[in-house]
Image (cartoon, helix red, strand yellow):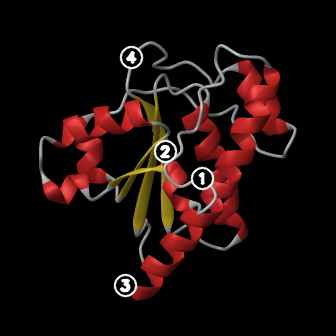
Amino acid sequence: MNVGNEPEMRVLFVCLGNICRSPTAEGIMRQRLDAVGLAGRVAVDSAGTGPWHVGDPPDRRAVAAAAGRGYDLSPLRGRQVSPVDLVDFDYVIAMDENNLVDLRSMADGRCELLDRIALLGDFSARHRGQPVGDPYYGGTNGFDRVLDMIETCIDGLVVDITERLDRA
């Protein structure tokens, strides 16, 4: 059990620009952790593999779709993932295969870092091996589909984290 102010576990969600999928996952994860009483024990962040949106808020369509389901993404700001993140986070969760390849490349073959990297879809039996599609160039319904998948996968991730914390 966490007796100090430091979280026992740290989770990072990663997509390409950190304005659609990964901040959506961060917002959902924060709410889910709060609902099960783990908010103080698990830190959550998100980042992008590219530098294009550092300091920017999430895409307005992602914010609107998330708000429609009760998630607040408005305080989040984009940042770029760094090799230090692979050391600092227990879970580094990629939204798609390209993000996964980029993160594995950053790990530079270090097994202890590679073991922290996973695809979000792998936390759901229904979506195992599937990428969270990038809704950026599509219509607003793409953001709803992304929310559907991320919600399902986050539920599985919360179970995984809970089991891991219980074993610690």
In front: 121, or 7? Answer: 121
Q: CA distance from mark 2 to mark 1?
A: 22 Å
Q: Earlier in the sequence, mark 2 or mark 1?
A: 2
Which class describes the residues within 10 Å of circle 4: few (<14), some (14-19), or many (20+)?
A: some
Question: In this figure, which residue is indicated by the disc labeled 2?
Answer: 45
- Residue 127: assigned label: 1
Looking at the rendered structure, the secondary structure element under dot 1 is loop
Given the image, on which type of amino acid does mark 4 rest? Pro
Question: In this figure, which residue is indicated by the disc labeled 3?
Answer: 168
Looking at the rendered structure, the secondary structure element under dot 4 is loop
- Residue 113: assigned label: none
Given the image, on which type of amino acid does mark 3 rest? Ala
* Residue that appears at 72% across and 28% down: 62
Q: Earlier in the sequence, mark 1 or mark 3?
A: 1
Looking at the rendered structure, the secondary structure element under dot 2 is strand
- Residue 51: assigned label: 4
Q: CA distance from mark 1 to mark 4?
A: 28 Å
Q: Quadrant of residue 48?
A: top left
For the question of whether residue 159 can be seen, the reply is yes
Q: Earlier in the sequence, mark 2 or mark 4?
A: 2
